Image: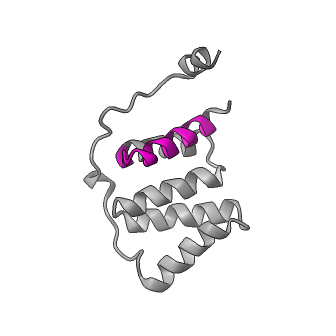
Amino acid sequence: MDLAWFWLDTGVALMGEHALDNALAAFERATLLDPHCADAHFQKGLVLAQLGHEKEAHEAFARSVELKPEFEEAAAEVEEGASSGRFEIASPASERRPLAGLQVLSERQVRSRSA
């Protein structure tokens, strides 16, 4: 399994548990491992929007559309946010809460667990 997709799947699972800060960390890890993964940028945008980081959410959605122009759901978020003015307020990254409880695994640890 590709590590970026591992983190993407982990982030989705964490969103389902309402662990948004940890989900954000997982999506950030996925986008670092694969900067061209439109799905990871989109999911990151969803979490950022839920956390009230509207400008950063808009940037994540826009990056997702840039990478995958046919990504209709991401394009709709960009268009809706721009037309509603929803993405006008920026929240500094320094205001985010620390990532409590997220265990970051090395590539070797991930491979040994999946073997």
How many discs mark residues in the rendered view?
A: 0
Give percent across and percent down for residue 114.
62, 20
Q: Is residue 68 magenta?
A: no
Q: Which residues are magenta?
A: 4-21
- In percent of the image, x 37 and y 48: which residue is there? 18
Give percent across and percent down for residue 83.
49, 85
- In percent of the image, x 49 and y 54: which residue is there? 44
- In the displayed structure, 32 sits above or below 68; it is above
Q: Residue furthest front?
A: 16
- In the displayed structure, 109 sits above or below 11; it is above
- In the displayed structure, 54 sits above or below 98; it is below
- In percent of the image, x 36 and y 46: which residue is there? 21
In this rendering, position of residue 67 left or right of residue 83: right
Q: Nearer the viewer, residue 91 or 15?
A: 15
Query: Which colouring convention does the figure follow?
Result: one colour
Q: Quadrant of the C terminus?
A: top right
Residue 61: quarter of image? bottom right
Give percent across and percent down for residue 103.
40, 27
Type of secondary structure dominating the magenta stretch: helix
Q: Residue furthest bottom?
A: 83
- In percent of the image, x 36 and y 45: which residue is there? 19
Residue 65: quarter of image? bottom right
Q: Quadrant of the N terminus?
A: top right
- In the displayed structure, 47 sits above or below 16; it is below
